[in-house]
Image (cartoon, rainbow, N blue to C red):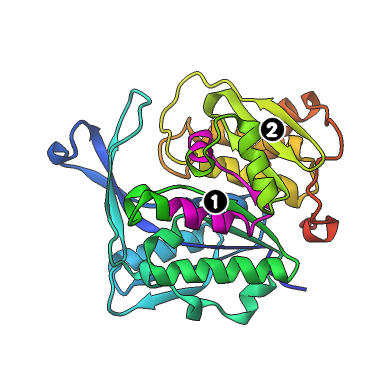
Amino acid sequence: MSEIDILSFGETMAMLVAEQTGDLAKVEQFHKRIAGADSNVAIGLSRLGFNVAWLSRVGNDSLGRFVVETLVKEGLDCSHVEVDKNQPTGFQFKSRNDDGSDPQVEYFRRGSAASHLSKQSITPSLLDARHLHATGIPPALSASAREMSFELMTRMRAAGRSVSFDPNLRPSLWASESEMIREINRLAALAHWVLPGLSEGRLLTGFDDPADIAAFYLDQGAEAVAIKLGPEGAYYRTHLDQGFVAGVPVTTVVDTVGAGDGFAVGMISALLEHKSFAEAVQRANWIGSRAVQSRGDMEGLPTRLELSDEFEAAFASRLAPTGECIPTVGASLLAKRPA
């Protein structure tokens, strides 16, 4: 049996976060962190006790070493991270906003080491993972990274593994909107669990209503869909059930970046623990709400102890399951991690 519970892949960038508010051009002090939606999810799942393998590339530079060292400290298996001797590690600048608004982010990632990910980066042992989480970011980086995304998702699903997919649209990285929509929907059709935001779902499907967006992906091959509705919560639909789970009230929003990644952490972890889809959405909403109350992209993601002490005590007893909501991929794919 594979020792890898979850395989995740993509680009982790170094991130320079402003210490002062205001225009980045006028900020004089920054502190160094890491950033990347895919690795945020990987870190969140690692904190909850899953064995997570991380597939990526970094440059042969100080930022690349910083990225890998940080991910290893978070418990990720980085033995499959390649070091590129010719291309640099991507990085970004992020503003500090104290009013809860979206921060300004400037990216320096074109031609980065991670954009040179390819099918050749896939080793046979990675395909033994019990679950694959994918997003729409790696396929936007380059043609070779897109090929790798399709290869991983196709092979993992064919092997009987469960696959989750978050569109995580990055329009600026695509040649055109039509190409983005076409390719993202092709990838979504390879996943069991599709996790779009409402605005993403509307753009990708042409439908306005969450029920219609979910039905579009169910018809394309997904077995369950959860649509993020922001502070209001989320709508979910499977072939067996559907419903709305209210959001978790937040008094003060500190940093909105990473909320969707927290949602994915909640969904994937709960489903791999045999929770119903309704219960998974409740956990996802809670982790997403926790993420926006902390400064940083992944700093608010909880540990297993925090999940038990805070979420389960406060919310688990309140959510009455509406029926058997687990997708029909089967219990054997939901690989519950032993205590």
Image side of residue 108 versus residue 181, left or right: left
Magenta stretch contains residue 249: no
Residue at figure coordinates x 83%, y 31% from the top left: 321
Residue 206: x, y in percent?
52, 38
Magenta stretch contains residue 192: yes
User: On the image, numbered disc 2 is attached to which residue?
Assistant: 282
Residue 332 visible at all: yes
**On-image quarter of the N terminus:** bottom right
Amino acid residing under circle 1: Val
- Up-down relation of residue 250 to residue 134 (above or below): above
The numbered disc on residue 41 is 1
Mark 2 burial class by Cα count in 10 Å: few <14, some 14-19, many 20+: many
Amino acid residing under circle 2: Gln
Magenta span: predominant SS is: helix
Span shown in magenta: 180-202
Residue 126: x, y in percent?
62, 74
Residue at figure coordinates x 57%, y 23% from the top left: 232
Residue at figure coordinates x 58%, y 40% from the top left: 263
Mark 1 burial class by Cα count in 10 Å: few <14, some 14-19, many 20+: many
* Labels 2 and 1: the sequence-earlier one: 1
Q: Nearer the viewer, residue 318 or 136?
A: 136
Instruction: Kindly state the secondary structure of the residue where label 2 is placed.
Output: helix
Residue 282: x, y in percent?
69, 32
Residue at figure coordinates x 64%, y 35% from the top left: 212
